[in-house]
């Protein structure tokens, strides 16, 4: 099994001494900034330990800037290393200092869209053994000891094989990490308090697309010509499914900067952005989640992923010194 790389400097100090610890698991570079950029920036700024695990380098992505077209997998096949650099820049914009690639950089390759031959390529994440991949994540969980995990729903938000696999691996690892009989060499068992899936409420999205269509009707107002549709956006659900919303208004600029860092994949023109399909969609500074494991306090939407979790460090918990 390939060792995970040693993490760099960590915001908020060693994990066991930080009261709030958040782990996010994503498929490709850029997924984190689009889905959770404001959330990550907010908690990092507040002193929480924010750890991002990305499962692939995103080697099979399309390339937006013509000057970088040579990086594509059907040409130089150097998009992966380039996206590693983009991700590093995005993390700087969000103030997140602990980022890892699952199993180490390049351990799992981007599988491409569902049904393409790259799905079955040796090393493709989609064809990886789930328990083997989950073991890499168990190591991270037992080291970082997060109270909160964020990942995708069972469909990966929109059916991409790597997103589906990231969901499977994250949920499997969350189940294995507290088991003392599973790979004791990977660290002391740790049980995650709360697990969330990324969501977008349909009502919010419809309002955003309404504004977008009005802006597109004004010639020259936007660099985009067409709008995406609600079905193009991952993780859309009826509003009542959403349990939690994180107001990232104060961190919208950081999220936009992080998204711009992924220049091969995203074009940002606030309050909108487009992927390689050039179809505009709303930029959301408030980010939404569904709590799927853990206790929810009351019936209203949460405004904090750590709601209901005692606010003291692992060391305080272990030593019995928490107030």
Image (cartoon, rainbow, N blue to C red):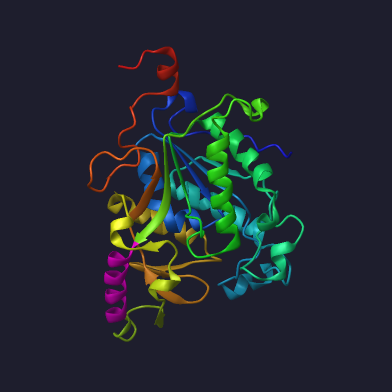
In this rendering, the count of numbered labels is: 0
Left or right of 232, for residue 6: right
Q: Classify residue 175 by image quadrant.
A: top right
Indicate whether residue 207 is drawn in magenta: yes
Q: What residue appears at the point 55 percent right and 26 percent down from the top-left corner? A: 189
Residue 103 visible in this rendered orientation of the protein: no
Residue 62 on image: x %, y %: 60, 70
Magenta part mainly helix, strand or loop?
Answer: helix
Quarter of the picture containing the N terminus is: top right
- The quarter of the rendered structure image containing the C terminus is top left
When asked about the image quadrant of residue 142, the answer is: top right
**In percent of the image, x 55 and y 57: which residue is there?**
163
Front-most of residues 142 and 130 = 130
Which percent across, then down, holds residue 205? 32, 67
Q: Is residue 299 above or below residue 138?
A: below
Across and down, in percent, residue 53 comes to 55, 45
242 left or right, relative to 13 = left
Q: Is residue 36 above or below residue 13?
A: below
The residue located at (67%, 47%) in the rendering is 105
Q: Looking at the image, can residue 183 be seen?
A: yes
Q: Nearer the viewer, residue 111 or 190?
A: 190
Whether 318 is among the magenta residues is: no
2 left or right of 255? right
Residue found farthest to the right: 122
Q: Residue at x 33, y 82 (%)?
A: 216
Judging depth in this view, the residue of 56 and 157 nearest the camera is 157
Image coordinates of residue 199 in percent, x first then y, are 39, 57
Please report the bounds of the magenta region as a residue range.
Answer: 201-215
């Amino acid at each position: 099994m390939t060792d995970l790389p040693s993490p760099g400097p960590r915001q908020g100090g060693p994990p066991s001494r930080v009261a709030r610890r958040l782990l996010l698991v994503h498929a490709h570079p850029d997924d984190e900034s689009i889905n959770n950029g404001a959330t990550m920036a907010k908690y990092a700024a507040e002193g929480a330990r924010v750890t991002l695990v990305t499962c692939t380098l995103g080697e099979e992505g399309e390339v937006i800037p013509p000057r970088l077209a040579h990086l594509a997998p059907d040409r130089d096949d150097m998009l992966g290393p380039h996206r590693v650099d983009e991700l590093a820049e995005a993390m700087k914009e969000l103030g997140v200092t602990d980022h890892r690639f699952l199993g180490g950089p390049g351990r799992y390759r981007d599988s491409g869209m569902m049904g393409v031959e790259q799905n079955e390529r040796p090393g493709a994440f989609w064809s990886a053994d789930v328990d083997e991949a989950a073991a890499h994540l168990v190591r991270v969980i037992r080291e970082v000891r997060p109270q909160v995990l964020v990942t995708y729903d069972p469909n990966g938000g929109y059916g991409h094989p790597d997103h589906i696999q990231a969901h499977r691996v994250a949920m499997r690892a969350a189940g294995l990490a507290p088991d003392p009989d599973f790979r004791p060499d990977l660290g002391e068992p740790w049980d995650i308090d709360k697990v969330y899936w990324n969501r977008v409420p349909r009502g919010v999205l419809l309002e955003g697309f309404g504004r977008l269509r009005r802006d597109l009707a004004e010639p020259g107002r936007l660099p985009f010509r067409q709008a995406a549709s609600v079905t193009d956006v991952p993780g859309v659900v009826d509003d009542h499914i959403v349990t939690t919303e994180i107001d990232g208004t104060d961190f919208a600029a950081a999220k936009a900067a992080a998204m711009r860092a992924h220049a091969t994949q995203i074009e940002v023109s606030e309050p909108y952005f487009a992927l390689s399909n050039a179809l505009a969609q709303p930029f959301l500074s408030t980010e939404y989640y569904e709590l799927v494991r853990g206790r929810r306090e009351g019936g209203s939407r949460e405004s904090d992923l750590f709601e209901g979790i005692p606010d003291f460090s692992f060391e305080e918990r272990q030593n019995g010194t928490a107030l």
